[in-house]
Amino acid sequence: MAKEQARGSRNQDITLDPWGTVEVKDYDRLLKVFGIKPFSDVMPLLKKAGMEPSLHMKRGIIFGHRDFDKVLEAKAKGEPVAVLTGFMPSGKFHFGHKMTVDQLIYLQRHGFKIFVVIADAEASIVRKIPRKEAIRIGVEEYIASMIALGLDPKKTDFYFQTSRGTSYYRLIQLFAGKITTAEMEAIYGDISPAKVIAALTQAADILHVQLEEYGGYKWVVVPVGADQDPHLRLTRDIADRVSDIINLTRPASTYHRLQRGLDGGKMSSSRPEYTIFLTDEPRIARMKLMKALTGGRATAEEQRRLGGIPEACTVYDMDKYHLMQDDELSRIYNSCRSGSLLCGECKLLAWSKLEKFLDDYKRRLEKARDIAWSIVDVPKF
Ligand code: TRP
Ligand code: SF4
């Protein structure tokens, strides 16, 4: 068994389940247990590759990577670099998704070719989402949102898993001959035929962009939440194992901290009270934000005396992930800590930014929906 896989996903009481609902809490342990490298290691290499660190990199939201140093070195030498990431079309587009798209936009501006897969096969076989629904959500919620946020549709290859070319499906079959049931169980725990196919399809998503038909040789990085790491480890091993038949380079990956929901739990379409969608009516979005869990104290008097805890605050998360510039963010941090800013006022600062964003976004989304239907190969059944 190859060395990455031997470490397994169920290891020293950390379980990573890409289909589960458990949150990753201890990021430092994750680095140690699974051999993900701290992102700070590659910060000095960005400049050589002609890149300024992105907001997420500077703010520690992107915390880890595998082989991203190799991608940056290749880019510095002028070799072709690309990004591939994917979304399961299982609900409405929310601020957690926006964070990944912001990374794609940043990388697109720095010359990375962008591939985005709508994981509709996975949505229907693992999550049992009706086909028509998965397709509509894929186009109108996901692809349209990405265009509205600023991803250039002319330079992005958006595709559905169920309408890609033959060579992509050929990879899935080829990969099936290179794995054993025991390995799949070691990585994913409880495994079913649907999950095996979903995992191999995801490996094909990541690796097929190196095929001639999709532009040939290139370095590929996959930006994901840490829960997707089992798929990355499997894909890296598979790339090694098919080398007798086809030459595929192991993919690199970067890992971000998933933004929490507004109660501090998981942000998810299935928890709409604690998740702000980009299409929320202003009144609804405002209400969610005003009720959000903060790091404030029980009384105003106590907060003035002791200060708040921005690290524990989901409003501060919105500021940090999406809403504030560097100087604004540090001002909020310091005045929260010192007790000079109270939560009510702080929420209004966040709301004034969010209100503008949502208003502007609404107009851009309308146009983007038409574009989205016209640029993607929509699955037939
Ligand atoms: N499994 C991913 C999810 O649950 C979606 C996905 C499919 C994906 N193919 C991918 C993510 C390739 C990254 C790379 O959201
Ligand atoms: Fe959060 Fe702002 Fe309250 Fe501090 S003052 S705990 S950042 S809402």
Image (tube, rainbow, N blue to C red):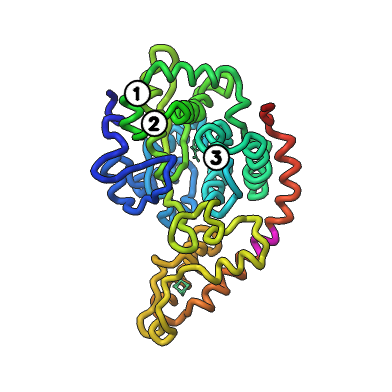
**In 3D space, how far apart are the residues under numbered discs 1 and 2 (Cα atoms)?**
9 Å
- What is the three-letter code of the residue carrying label 1? Thr
The residue carrying mark 3 is: 88
Numbered badge on residue 181: 1
* Residue 40 on image: x %, y %: 35, 49
Whether 359 is among the magenta residues is: yes
Classify mark 3 as within 8 Å of ligand 1 or not, answering yes or no. yes
Residue contact between numbered discs 1 and 2, judged by CB atoms under 8 Å: yes
Find out if the beta carbon at label 1 lies less than 8 Å from the nearest ligand 1 atom. no
Q: Is residue 329 magenta?
A: no
What range is drawn magenta here?
356-360
Where is residue 73 drawn, in percent x and y?
Answer: 41, 35
Mark number for residue 123? Answer: none
**Residue type at tag 2:** Ile
Under circle 3, the secondary element is loop
Which residue position holds label 2? 191
